[in-house]
Amino acid sequence: MKTVKTLVAAAALAISATAAHAADTIKIGEINHYKRLAAFAEPYKKGIELGLKEVNASGGVLGKPLEFIFRDDQGKPGEAIKIAEELMTRDGAVMLTGTILSNVGLAISSFAAEKGYVYLAAEPLADALVWSAGNPYTFRLRTSTFVQAAMLAEAAAKTDALKYATIAPNYAYGKDAVEAFKVNLKKLKPEVEFVTEQWPALFKIDAGAEVQAIEAAKPDAIYNVTFGPDLAKFVREGTTRGLFDDRNVYGLLTGEPEYLEPLGEEAPEGWVVTGYPWYDIPAGPGLDFVKAYEAETGETPKIGSLVGYMTVQSIAALITKAGSTETSALLGAFPGLKVETPLGEISYRDVDHQSTMGAFIGTTALKDGAGVMVDWTYKDPEAYMPSDEEIKSMRPAE
Amino acid sequence: MGLFVAQLLTGLANAAALFLVASGLSLIFGVTRIVNFAHGSLYMLGAYVGLTLMNTLPGAFGFWGSIVLAGLVVGLIGILIEICVLRPIYRAPELFQLVATFGVILVIQDLALMIWGAEDRLGPRAPGLKSVVRILGEPVPQYDLALIAITPFILFALWWFITRTRIGILVRAATQDREMVGALGVNQSWLFTGVFFLGAALAGLGGAIQLPKGGADLLMDLNIISAVFVVVVIGGMGSIPGAFIASVLISVLNVFGVAYIPQSTLVLIYVVMAVVLTVRPYGLLGREEKAGEHGQVGEVERPIRPVGTRGRAFVFVLLVVLACVPFVGSSFLQVLITDILIFCLFAASLQFILSSGGLVSFGHAVFFGGGAYAAALLVTYADTPMELALLCAPLGAGLLALGIGWFCIRLSGVYFAMLTLAFSQLVWSLVYQWGAVTGGDDGLVNIWPSAWLSGTTAYYYFTLAVGVGGILVLRHIIHSPFGYTLRATRDSARQAEATGIDVKRVQWLAFALAGTMAGLAGGLFVFSKGSIFPNELEIGKSFDALIVVFLGGVKTLSGGVVGAVFMESIKDWLTRLEYWRLILGLVIIGVVIIAPDGIVGSLRKLGERIGLLKEQESMR
């Protein structure tokens, strides 16, 4: 009988969940991998909730409350597309946003262009979204991978290191990140040499073997793109076996709290990384956000929290500027849209629909048994972007 | 030389956790014939439980004690699963239990998230074993050496247990012929429970012992399961020394793969697996399956018959209703039904080979994804018009099925299943790692239908026509002489051969036909979504289809379709909830226990009992 009860309970829950939102609100369809990548999606969702609370406390947008409908796509692109259609046609969403995984972002982007929906890709890392597979309906908030890799390459070019090893997860994001680093570093310092490239399968790293392979190539410096559990294993094996001794290490995203915090007191010291030093932000909108977030959730912010919060700010600014929720008005208002955020004012570029959200770059250190970023600077991305001509030639003809 | 030795040692150390998990799975399969998909979940639980204990218990004693305790705790969880979930369904058709274990995976995923939270946890280092030893100048972590020392000890302990104790003798006897063991008066259910405890404990131990080399995260359950399957299959199902040799082989190969072909490590593993299985079909130390080969396991399937007038009328009304959907339903309803229809066709193609052919494929998604990729590649690289590309989807998948089938149909039973899994994983890893052509993980996008089909309603009608058409064709073939021949090869290959049927050729053709139909579904899928990604030919997609076929009823004709409709609708409904995986898992387990003959099979029995349906003449 227990199973019958469960079924009934499930049914009751499902019905109440579908009937929940009926009031006259402006709805945004938010699709993410809340279960598949809970470690990244949960802080992001909390950032959105904080943003919504603030927007609605000050009267909402166009006189109506703003509402996000959160849906889980199980990490499957095909599923995400079905949900996107439902959000737009049945739930009355005015636009789509969300996703962390690049492949899901690309799938929704293609779908949005086909059906004529506005899509703000919040977190996906693949630059293809705005460049090689860009389209008029897709915009992206998160700092591009190319830019962050270029910032690290700039730092690397200032050192004497000539022989580099790279390690990156063997999928599209990892490939892009390594390619961007190589291109930018070679441009600044043509004599550098890449002595080995390691490509562990995503979340299936064989850390001991990777460390040995890198060690065997005797590089002067290492460029790391691994993240999550892969990073933890790589750092542990590398530290144990002395791989990082007397070597410069550059870590893309390694300084983000999502990845640095789980390492605890074993966080590597002296790596040059991009990340988010929330503990060290000077007074201003950046600190206001950190404090508001801590007060609201009782947790410290991750970079996902910041992106979620900025997603709400971007959408609220967009609808206010458009003065309507019609797709054509939104599309007209999005290019060149300026948004006040905890990182200062950002805008959505006309040329590729990429936001001008920048990146924090600094050096890792240990403080009170936890990894932090020190000597960091916040850098504007524009100087590191490819030229407008290059971007135009990458983007498909519209 | 130093590097070579160091690499070898790394491989051996990596083999430890893999061996523990794989030997547990192998043991459980050998005795209970259950393919435990949830074994990776037990491994994950071992890691989390071990981590929690290590944070409470101090010192070296606490560290090693935690590992052993984690094994015991997970073993007890294994007992719980065995008694609550598996015991009620031992009499169900062969392999049916894997559906229940799939439900267990979902439940454990959500429970782990609830208990331990989303953040990845780094495991503590082993006390006293934190640094490295220099061997021939190369640094080797002390903990690696400890793992290398522990593994043979566990292997020896298991060997001693299996060969020298009375329980071990019973376990071995049950591995060889469990019916005979039962007939000799051994209480089978307690033997099964005991073996499940041991297998689960080994998985938990594996999870805890790898903590100093990694940690615990919520993705580790599914991340290890394919590697574990590879090891168990290469070693030979049910063989513990085989699992040891295979885990060492795979781990060492992987280490050298990392050093010399870093781009293609995934491909390497599956190539090795496919080669080993082609040369030694039963794995390195596995034995040919004898029991249960002749005739069917469990209740005999009823003879099939064409649908009666009432059934036809029902299907007709259903089709009329579906045809009316665009006039009354929302645009989303059409999209949802399109998705369901595509999945139904995919499930029906698996049902065809599984139910009528008796060939359980664990890699059917390779044809679904293969068809989709065939179409998508043609559109991307040759600007092929959609109509032609869609036609090439079933053709491409059919050719792929002919190729893979040629290798696989030489085997039968679970070894056939495992070889199909190996080939499908091989194709998946190729698609995933050959980014230059397939786009890798970022897939192929902008594959949209021609103008005349670009509307939601137009594509809906198109899918309705093609999908239902495909299902009807399959059904028609089942009732044709070819279908009867196919069932003859399933029920008794020997007798079929004696009557002049070329068993292998019939199976091969049926396999290719099922692949073709799956490819057709894949073609429909890619144009409805506009994009294709490697996850559509992943192991998980194959299991999705397998689960709906079993859930619908493997010994029925319509089980796949009914199961697919049930599963897709309930998923669409539940994923709106916070803890949908937990609820879905419980629903699956519930259905499996209430309806051990599948939804259709159990409804039919119920109908007969209350007199709605007449029992068939031929059953008397």
Image: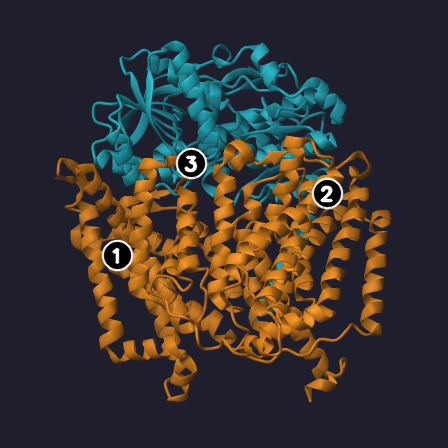
Chain colours: A cyan, B orange
Relative image position of residue A193 (x, y in whole percent): 33, 18
Q: Mark 3 sits on what residue?
A: A299
Q: Amino acid at mark 1?
A: Ile
Q: Secondary structure at mark 3?
A: loop
- Mark 1 vs mark 2, foreground winner is 1
Question: Are dots 2 and 3 on a single chain?
Answer: yes
In this rendering, the count of numbered labels is 3
Image position of B601 with respect to B425: above or below: below
Image position of A283 with respect to B596: above or below: above
Q: Crowding at label 3, few (<14), some or many (≥20) Cα neighbours within 10 Å?
A: few
Q: Nearer the viewer, residue B35 or A279?
A: B35
Question: Are dots 1 and 3 on a single chain?
Answer: no
- Left or right, B289 with respect to B48, comes to right
Which disc, if any, is residue B67? 1
Question: Which residue is drawn at the image coordinates 37% and 38% (left, top)?
Answer: A230
Question: Which residue is drawn at the image coordinates 25% and 67% (left, top)?
Answer: B158
Image position of B615 with respect to B385: above or below: below
Q: Nearer the viewer, residue B585 or B156?
A: B156
Which disc, if any, is residue B154? none
Q: Amino acid at mark 3?
A: Glu
For the N terminus of chain B, the quadrant is top left
Q: CA distance from mark 1 to mark 3?
A: 31 Å
Q: Crowding at label 1, few (<14), some or many (≥20) Cα neighbours within 10 Å?
A: many
Q: Chain of mark 3?
A: A
Q: Chain of mark 2?
A: A
Q: Mark 2 sits on what residue?
A: A22
Q: Chain of mark 1?
A: B
Quadrant position of residue A140? top right
- Mark 1 vs mark 3, foreground winner is 1
Say whether marks 1 and 3 touch (CB < 8 Å).
Answer: no
